[in-house]
Image (cartoon, rainbow, N blue to C red):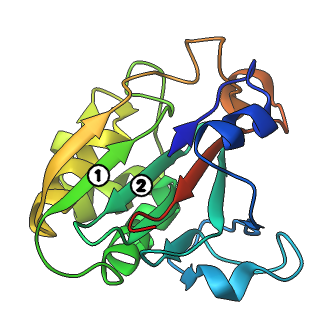
Amino acid sequence: MAFTDRMDVPSEALALIGGGGPLAQLQQVHSARVVAIDDTLGEPGAVEADGIYVPAGHHALAAIRTADCLPLVVANRKGDAVALHVGWRGLAAGVVEAGLAHLGGDGLVAVIGPHIRSCCYEFRGPERYVVAHRFGESSFVGDNLSLESALSGLLVQQRVREVHSVGHCTFCNDAYHSYRRDGTGERQMTYVGAGGH
């Protein structure tokens, strides 16, 4: 697994994790849809979904693109993994539950990548009530949303006992692309391969 920033060369990041085979990418639409990697290996970006499941031993890599949304990688002891694009819409719709349904069992480990954090994510309007109803007021710091706090309670419910976070905010750290800060179309990449090779 590798998270890139705006200075990384994607081919170099792929080389670090043993890339050389096919690369699966999605047309991300802020949904709860998670697909198996073999369903994505035709035309890159042709499949609309927000998560890719990579079974243990698979030779292809999965890629998720984010600017301010949260990239989440979860794996089990067998080496199965899911890579998820988690914005507030996908989180509320159930993309995390859909991804974890592919892994099953206990012993799950999650890694949270760079995303807009509560220091910078002002979140008002009717959307706030959707998130507060689903994940509780503890997901907020004043008027700001913490995607990580909303996610953490859900991961506990889903028996994910080990969670690691990069801890970087894409908005206040200019090493990262941020749509909210710059209106950019550029994205960070999260590359994920299966274990058990």
| Image quadrant assignment for residue 178 | top right
| Image quadrant assignment for residue 16 | top right
| Image quadrant assignment for residue 41 | bottom right
Residue furthest to the front: 197
Judging by the rendered image, the residue that carries numbered circle 1 is: 110
User: In the image shown, does 117 or 192 lie closer to the viewer?
Assistant: 192
Tell me the residue at 73%/24% (across/down).
Answer: 8
Please indicate whether residue 7 sits to the left or right of residue 89 in the image. right
Please indicate whether residue 7 sits to the left or right of residue 175 in the image. right
Q: Is residue 183 visible?
A: yes
Tell me the amino acid under the disc marked 1: Ala
Badge 2 density bin: few <14, some 14–19, many ≥20, Cα 10 Å: many
Q: Is residue 67 visible?
A: no
Q: Do residues under tags 2 and 1 come within 8 Å of each other at their CB atoms?
A: yes
User: In the image shown, does 132 or 194 lie closer to the viewer?
Assistant: 194
Identify the secondary structure beneath mark 2: strand
Tell me the residue at 53%/59% (across/down).
Answer: 193
Q: Check the image and report above or below for 106 versus 185.
A: below
Percent across and percent down for residue 150 are 27, 49
Identify the secondary structure beneath mark 1: strand
Q: Check the image and report above or below for 189 versus 196.
A: above
Judging by the rendered image, the residue that carries numbered circle 2 is: 73
Tell me the residue at 64%/32% (across/down).
Answer: 4
Badge 1 density bin: few <14, some 14–19, many ≥20, Cα 10 Å: many
The label on residue 174 is: none
Percent across and percent down for residue 98 are 39, 80
Tell me the amino acid under the disc marked 2: Val
Tell me the residue at 83%/31% (across/down).
Answer: 184
Percent across and percent down for residue 196 are 38, 68
